[in-house]
Amino acid sequence: MTKQEWILRLRRCTSKETLERVIEKNKYSLSDDELEHFN
């Protein structure tokens, strides 16, 4: 998933809880290089 795809997915979240769930679910599926884009 590209950074742009991630941003678009996160923008659809309407509450903090939903945002946290999406992040928690997907953060383990990213490689270290992919995670670096968000730092």
Image: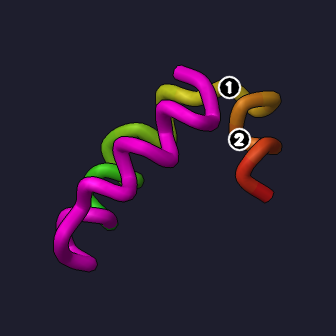
Q: How did the renderer colour the structure? A: rainbow
Residue drawn where x is 68% and y is 25% of the image: 31
Provide the major secondary structure of the magenta segment: helix
What is the x, y in percent for residue 17? 20, 74
What is the x, y in percent for residue 38? 72, 52
- According to the picture, the residue beneath numbered tag 1 turns out to be 31
Quarter holding the C terminus is bottom right
Residue drawn where x is 76% and y is 32% of the image: 32
Residue drawn where x is 71% and y is 41% of the image: 35
Q: Are marks 1 and 2 in contact (CB under 8 Å)?
A: yes
Left or right relative to 9: residue 37: right
Q: Secondary structure at mark 2?
A: helix
Quarter of the image holding residue 4? top right
What amino acid type is highlighted by mark number 2? Leu
Circle number at residue 35: 2
Q: Residues within 10 Å of mark 1 (few under 14, many from 20)?
A: few
Magenta span includes 33: no
Magenta span includes 16: yes
Q: CA distance from mark 1 to mark 2?
A: 6 Å
Q: Which residues are magenta?
A: 1-19
